[in-house]
Amino acid sequence: MAIFFIQVTLQGQPEIEIYKKLDALMEIHGFNQSISGLQDKTILTQAFYYGRSLLTANSLCDWIHSLAATGVWPNVAVLVIEASNWAMIRSNS
């Protein structure tokens, strides 16, 4: 399974409840807004998701666009990045 980072942009002025609906839909399909590390969990920005899939980046992009456009908000843009190697660092506050 490949690792993917996904950004979904709801174009226009959706209210926060719409984003919550998107978050729930993405989570049902295994894409989360958090990354768990060795010691803690990092929360990603709004409508940015992390997960794994057997689909190609193009197929995943089409599928997520269809899900979001029919079930959440009609005007959607989707960016899917397949990550073969990535790193993250976070400052503790």
Image: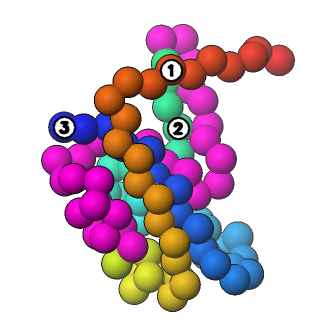
Q: Is residue 19 left or right of residue 3?
A: right
User: Can residue 65 be seen by looking at this rendering?
Assistant: yes
Q: Is residue 51 above or below residue 90?
A: below
Residue 9 percent across, percent down from the top left: 58, 68
Give the SS element for disc 3.
Answer: loop
For the N terminus, give its image quadrant: top left
Quadrant in the rendering for residue 18: bottom right
Which residue shows up at 60% across the image and 74% down it? Answer: 10
Count all numbered tags in the image, as a single digit: 3
Q: Which residue is mark 3?
A: 1
Q: In 3D space, how far apart are the residues under numbered discs 1 and 3 (Cα atoms)?
A: 18 Å
> Dot 2, how many residues are within 10 Å of its Cα: few (below 14), some (14-19), or many (20+)?
some
Q: Which color scheme is applied?
A: rainbow
- Is 20 included in the stretch rendered in magenta? no
* Mark 2 and mark 1 residues within 8 Å of each other at the beta carbon: no
Q: Is residue 24 above or below residue 88?
A: below
> Dot 3, how many residues are within 10 Å of its Cα: few (below 14), some (14-19), or many (20+)?
few
Q: Amino acid at mark 3?
A: Met
Q: Earlier in the sequence, mark 2 or mark 1?
A: 2
User: Can residue 24 be seen by looking at this rendering?
Assistant: no
Q: Amino acid at mark 1?
A: Ala
Q: Which residues are magenta?
A: 38-65
Quadrant in the rendering for residue 4: top left
Q: Which residue is mark 1?
A: 87
> Dot 1, how many residues are within 10 Å of its Cα: few (below 14), some (14-19), or many (20+)?
few
Q: In 3D space, how far apart are the residues under numbered discs 2 and 1 (Cα atoms)?
A: 14 Å
Q: Is residue 76 above or below residue 33?
A: below
Which residue shows up at 53% across the image and 38% down it? Answer: 34
Q: Which residue is mark 2?
A: 34
